[in-house]
Image (spheres, rainbow, N blue to C red):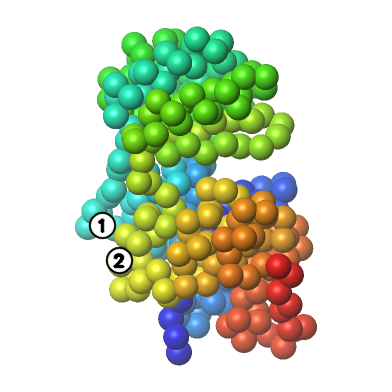
Amino acid sequence: MEKHLIVLDLDGTLLKEDKTISTRTYKTLQEAKKMGHLIAIATGRPYRASKMYYQQLGLDTPIVNFNGAYVHHPGDASFQTYHSPLDLETAKTIIDTCKAFQVNNMMAEVVDDVFLHDYDETFLDMFALHTDPAACGDLKTLLKSGPTSLLVYPKLEHAEELRHLISGEHAQGIEQRSWGAPHHMIEIISTGNNKAAGLEKAARYCGLTLDDVIAFGDEDNDIEMLSEAGSGVAMGNASPEAKQAAAEVTYSNEDEGIAVYLEERLHLTDKKKFEKQK
């Protein structure tokens, strides 16, 4: 049997809109594990906000957090943790640029510690994901080391200009991702970090390569993973760019696209044959 590493993005992919895993998808993944396949998570979330799903699925593989800027193994201390934060001075320059645009707010994360520029409970509920900030105030003063990630909430009318300015001034040192409506966030991590790069490390630990990976994703931060995996599968609800990067397109997260694809690909059931919808 050909052994695969099945890699799951979380939001918009594994998770339904209510942030749960459907029963069918859960059972399908457990069946895949019984067959000898491995399962891993690759997400833009920090570990604290992905831990519950890692545990729910009973995983024993490395996990890719912060879109590849932090790769670690929760259950194996022998795994060489990879952490590639932003350069501190670059981060401070970006913070100054954002201040000049009077952004709504900024958040810096150093692994699982959260530093918030302006205390805002609504912002914390939406983006801090299950933790209280370690401190609030001027991020330039609070940060003593380079952050794993910077999250910027710009004013809508300035969002595009700010993205271009950050990319122009700091393109050599950062990877920038834009979130869609309703918040139009800008997420910034150190250059060279993406889910595909993180997965290379996870696959190597499992004795596999990217050619052995079946990866599921839906957004622009999944593009490298979808294009470099042996089998990149975009969800039916994925962005046009993610669908273009993928080799195949399954049903949406609400329509249990992961289960539908794996049932056919791994011959788990005799259900209706999977049809590519690209």
- How packed mark 2 is, by other alpha carbons closer than 10 Å (few <14, some 14-19, many 20 or more), is some
The residue that disc 1 covers is 79
Q: Residue at x 76, y 63 (%)?
A: 255
Q: Nearer the viewer, residue 38 or 117?
A: 117
Residue occupying the far front of the picture: 168
Placement of 197 over or under 211, stated as above or below:
above
Q: Nearer the viewer, residue 72 or 174?
A: 174
Element assignment for label 1: loop
Q: Residue at x 45, y 31 (%)?
A: 167
Q: Residue at x 42, y 74 (%)?
A: 211
The residue that disc 2 covers is 205
Placement of 268 over or under 97, stated as above or below:
below
- How packed mark 1 is, by other alpha carbons closer than 10 Å (few <14, some 14-19, many 20 or more), is some
Kindly indicate whether the residue at mark 2 contacts the one at mark 1 (C-beta within 8 angstroms). yes
Q: Nearer the viewer, residue 54 or 270?
A: 270
Quadrant showing the C terminus = bottom right
Placement of 55 over or under 128, stated as above or below:
below
Q: Amino acid at mark 1?
A: Phe
Q: CA distance from mark 1 to mark 2?
A: 8 Å
